Amino acid sequence: MEDNLPVNVREYQELAKKALPKMHYDYINGGAEDEYTLRENIAAYGRILLRPRVLIDVSKIDMSTSLLGYNMPSPIIVAPTGAHKLANPEGEVATARAAAACNTIMVLSFSSSCRIEEVASSCDAIRFYQLYMCKRRDVSAALVQRAESLGFKALVLTVDRPVLGRREADIRNKMISPRFVNLEGLMSLDKDIDSAEGGSKLERFSRETLDPSLSWKDVEWLKSITSLPILLKGIITAEDARKAVEAGVSGVILSNHGGRQLDYAPATISALEEVVKAVEGSVPVLVDGGIRRGTDVLKALALGAKAVMVGRPVLYGLAARGEAGARHVIEMLNKELELAMALCGCRSVAEVTRAHVQTEGDGIRALL
């Protein structure tokens, strides 16, 4: 065991900042425009208090849960984040091994810097595949077929990026678009993309490749070409959550794209109860954005999330210490969750209830 290992996610973030070129750290860490939503994703968790119950036998804590029939030792999943080779040369292969070592589900990004085949063959694990809808539907269909044939168990369709949010750090840094290796051979990628004028190179790639006409009919199309369950990632309102259920998807992922798309969208944890109530238990609701502590996971579970997805923290671990760092981040969050459950008197995730948290809204309602 190494000496002086980081003891929390924030320490890993500091190490990542030191380890990475500024352009790459800013790409991983940055958000849209004023970065209000980016900051609020984290800050909103800090305004939720825990209500511990005492004199309960917590000598055994069971954090296990299941999602779409797949058992997990804890409700923490690795979120889809792009271009892991910016953090570490082994890229998504290292992240996949870290997730597999923790027996957790990893969602492989459309923007992966490793080929789908490389990740699939790197280790034995349950994995989902994240999809953006391309202007050319044959490209999207080919990616779906590859994921299916390689044993991925579900599709995560990201729906909050019809156009790229304005990420000013990337514009300032003239961020070079990472290689979209899984699109090579499927479509002609502009060789001049690295010399794009104005904005970021990533912005130009998105404009030329992704489909701004994405709508509910495309969810129907996706259902028609695959037998895999589909989760929609990027839902933030009750209205869209109800439409997702009507569309027959298998799950909803409450997400504002880590504060990288629409600035001044609400923090995901602040919108969670609204979305959970809207789906009325018909599909699982997952949440991402701003999770930095096990107590954050407990708060999300108490407000109705089936599981949480963790993105940047895993990249911080990967940047700081490679596969071992990514694995350690997941293990730390699991241990923190176990501790928080014990101190709140929750012996299983089923025992985590709404009564274990106090939100700002609770105080207001009490005064009415």
Image (spheres, rainbow, N blue to C red):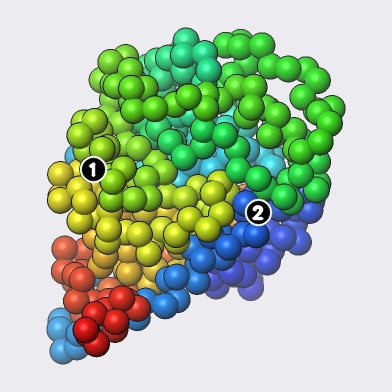
Secondary structure under badge 1? helix
Identify the amino acid type marked 1.
Answer: Arg
The residue wearing badge 2 is 33
Residue 152 visible in the shown view: no
Q: CA distance from mark 1 to mark 2?
A: 29 Å
Looking at the image, is mark 1 or mark 2 earlier in the sequence?
A: 2
Relative horizontal placement of residue 231, taking residue 349 as reference (left or right): right
The residue wearing badge 1 is 242
Vertical arrangement, residue 289 with respect to residue 101, above or below: below
For the point 51% across and 66% down, the residue is: 40
Q: Residues within 10 Å of mark 2 (few under 14, many from 20)?
A: some
Instruction: Report if the CB atoms under discs 1 and 2 are less than 8 Å apart.
Output: no
Vertical arrangement, residue 18 with respect to residue 102, above or below: below
Q: Which quarter of the figure has residue 249? A: top left
Image quadrant occupied by the C terminus: bottom left
- Residue 287 in the image: x percent, y percent? 36, 53
Q: Which quarter of the figure has residue 335? A: bottom left
Front residue of this view, candidates 97 and 87: 87
For the point 45% across and 61% down, the residue is: 267
